[in-house]
Image (cartoon, grey):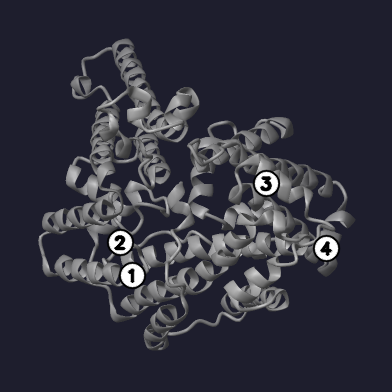
Amino acid sequence: MTFISLLYGLFLISTIVLYWGFQNRSTRLALLLFASLIFYGSVQLQSVPLLLLSAIVNFILGRAIGDDRTPIRYKRDWKLSNQAWKAANQSSQYRRVALLVVGIVFNVLLLLGFKYGSLLFPSSAEGTAAEVLGRGWGWLDPYLIAPLGISFFTFECLAYLIDVYRGAPISRDFLQFSAYRFFFPKLISGPITRYHQWSEQLEKQELPAIDRMGEGLWLIASGSIKKGLLADNLGLFVDLCFDNMQRAGSFDLWLAIVAYGFQLYLDFSGYVDIARGSAILLGGTLPVNFDFPYLTTSIADFWRRWHITLGDWLRNYLYFPLGGSRRGLSRTCINLMVVMLIAGIWHGSAGSHLDPRGYLVWGALHGLALVVHRWGDVLANRADWVKAWWRSVPGTVLAWGMTQGMVFLSWVFFRLPDLKESGWVMQHLWHYPADAQFAQKVYVESLGLGRSELTLLLGALTVGMGVAYLCDRGLKLQLNWPVKLLLVPACFYLVWLLAPQNSLPYIYFEF
């Protein structure tokens, strides 16, 4: 079951009707959990028990960390000496730290075990379980595949445990906790949410007003346009070009790089839009995950507006605990590199068809860009004329070009994590002629448009983003809900009419 399918539409409508038909809160949560398990099971049934086990372990650890926050057995004993009280508090703190470490190790090992286990056990990447362990072990094969969304699932569990350790309220209701963990709109590809933000919504949940329903349907419709009409069609060209890169020319490779950057953005943001729209119809709110990232003029601003919830997670649970920018410029630069390398590891995977080194290179490039940006800020603050020039129109245009040039070139390692393939592309970006039949096979026969038309299409997408940003931020123009409701059927019709017959899988499902 995928988001852009009639089956998902029927599933969502049925869930919404039943959900609001029940008045009891526990019944609603049970329905939500049941529906989420059906949704995930339709995609990868064999991983459901493992994720349920993970949810149980994190729920128990969260309660243990929260319940051990103060030495309760001494709480009302006013006769306790200050020294004894201090010792009790210290002992309690040690236990909480130990429990948190256990939780972090459990979740990290679960993530790394599925993603990078083949590096420790190379034979597991060379064949099936029957070939590695012997006859009779073939039944293990489906369970050795990394669960879809394991990266998002793990980061949300880590955030919950760390938040509880820092003093956030614990969950004492496993039904509510598991309904949050498995909430189907965000389960596989986010956005990454915190339990406490989600649980607060349940306390004041009510049937959405007509304007909110209109917003939810509009998000689903516009997300379908992004994914089905734009991302999937761009993906056809990207796959054709990179699968036949030796026959493509330099200009074709540049087009494929730009097309992939747009495909990735439209694919992922389209998924998030559908997830947010589905959540609204169920009375919830999921965080915004993108804010015109391809219009940013610095790499730091890019990471504030691209995959926003991942950036927030990296800042709150890695960058700040490492010291952030409080310990001098050199330490700040080291922290930035460490965080972005971990971001690369989070995205990567070592399997029979994946090379994790490309994702490490991608993370290192972004880390290096953030370091250069930080040094540039320091130098600019020492010369007012430099700062003024970067704020001028020529400076802004140059900053935008440099930022997006770096971002799009780094996508090469994201799309082609095998360093032999990505290295080949980087070496042939200039003066490399295309095979004589490449244009005929790819542009004419497969796509039905030429290089110039595709170039204009990519340019139109860029201009379209700029116009949308101007209307939203500059002119403060937005469609009202009646207009959005009228456009919803047209969006679905366009997707049905113009989307590729076989929808491409969501790119971030791999992570």
Amino acid carrying label 2: it is: Met
Q: Nearer the viewer, mark 4 or mark 3?
A: 3
Q: Position of residue 221 (x, y in %)?
A: 40, 76
* Residue 494 position in % (x across, y down): 44, 82
Instruction: Measure the C-alpha gap from mark 2 to mark 4.
Output: 47 Å
Q: Earlier in the sequence, mark 4 or mark 3?
A: 4
Horizontal and vertical percent position of residue 435: 74, 62
Q: Could you tell which of marks 2 and 4 lies nearer the N-terminus?
A: 2
Q: Cα distance, mark 4 to mark 3?
A: 31 Å
Q: Residue at x 61, y 33 (%)?
A: 338
Q: Mark 1 falls on what kind of element?
A: loop
Q: Is residue 243 left or right of residue 183?
A: right
Read off the residue under disc 2: 1
Q: Mark 2 against mark 4, which lies toward the viewer?
A: 2
Measuring 35% from the left and 76% from the top, which residue is drawn there? 217
Residue picked out by circle 1:
5
Alpha-carbon distance for marks 2 and 3?
A: 32 Å
- In the rendered structure, which amino acid carries the disc numbered 4? Gly
Q: Is residue 464 left or right of residue 200?
A: right
Q: Circle 4: is it few (<14), some (14-19), or many (20+) Cα within 10 Å?
A: some
Residue at the image position 63 percent from the left and 65 percent from the top = 259
The answer to whether 126 appears left or right of 462 in the picture is left
Q: Amino acid at mark 1?
A: Ser
| In contact (CB < 8 Å): disc 2 and disc 1 | yes
Dot 2 and dot 4 residues touching (CB under 8 Å): no
Find numbered disc 3 in the image and state the secondary structure of the residue it sits on: helix
Image quarter of the N terminus: bottom left
Residue matched to label 4: 395
Of residues 63 and 438, the one nearer the viewer is: 438
Q: Quadrant of residue 167?
A: top left
